[in-house]
Structure formats: C-alpha cells, structure tokens
Amino acid sequence: IHFARDPSSPLPPYVFPKEELEESRPVQEEPEFYPLVLPEDKDLITDYLYLAMEQMQPCNLMDADRVGCYKGRKTGFPGLACKHCVGQAGCGRYFPASEASLSQTTTSQTIVNHVRNC
C-alpha cells in the first residue's frame, strides 16, 4: 500500500465536487449543542441519572432512525443523542414522544444502560 500522505497526520478538509453540490438535498442539521442538565438540577435527580444525562445532547430524528416505535415520527423530531456516538443512527439516540414518556423509568434506565456500555 502506498499513501499519498502520512496516515497519522490529520485529514485535509473535504471539498465537494461541483456537481455533487448542485444535486444534493438539503440536510437536516443537528440542533446547536446545549447541556441537558445544569448544576442546579443535581438536587432533583439521582447522581447516576445526572451523570448519564450529562453524556447526552439534543439531536433530530433522521430517516435512518425511523424504525420500531419511531417509525411514525417525522424526520426532524427532537430527541436526545449520546455525545460519544451521536452520528450513528439507531445507536444511543432516543426520541421520547412526550415529557411524560421522558420521565418514565424505562426511558431513563435505557439511557443509563447505554451510557454505561458506550
């Protein structure tokens, strides 16, 4: 194998070919990052859940996420994604349908289990 550049050096920025730019569809951008829990929230939930929620960030449902219970949700639906595997559809991405479903033990336990194994 012959490399054109040193494989240990950083990748150069990707430049889109002109025709690829003209034919591309608009992409749903991820929401701006902001913390889901704040220091003043620490007294409201367990340390374990607080630490797990610190590992999450906002995201939007992608077409690839529309499986199982998320099948009926529209692309762009807001949700939570693990900071460590945020770009991977179906992995560490959660889209609770309501505030009530977010507060259910099964949802928080699923997030805690993911963060523990991530």
Image (cartoon, rainbow, N blue to C red):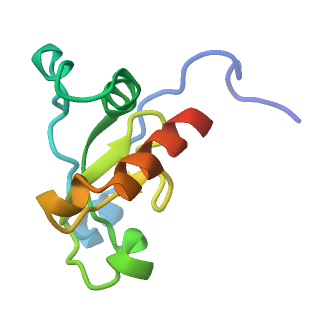
Please identify the residue farthest to the bottom as the structure is shown: 72
Q: Report the residue at 39% width, 31% height from top.
A: 52
67 w.r.t. 42: above or below: below
Residue 50 in sight: yes
> Could you say which is closer to the camera, residue 81 or residue 38?
38
Residue 107 to residue 1: above or below: below
Residue at horizontal 16 percent and vertical 30 percent from the top: 34
| Residue 73 point in image, percent of width and height | 23, 78
Residue at horizontal 48 percent and vertical 27 percent from the top: 12
Q: Is residue 106 left or right of 45 when viewed as pictured?
A: right
Q: Horizontal placement of 62 versus 74: left or right?
A: right
Where, quadrant-wise, is the C terminus in this rendering? Answer: top right
Q: Is residue 103 above or below residue 24?
A: above
Percent of width and height locating residue 111: 42, 46
Q: Is residue 87 visible?
A: no
Looking at this view, name the residue that lies furthest to the right.
1
Residue 45 is situated, as x and y percent measured from the top left of the image, at 25, 29
3 vs 60: above or below: above
Q: In the image, what residue occupies the spot 28% across and 72% down?
A: 23
Query: What percent of the width, then of the height, locates residue 70?
Result: 34, 76
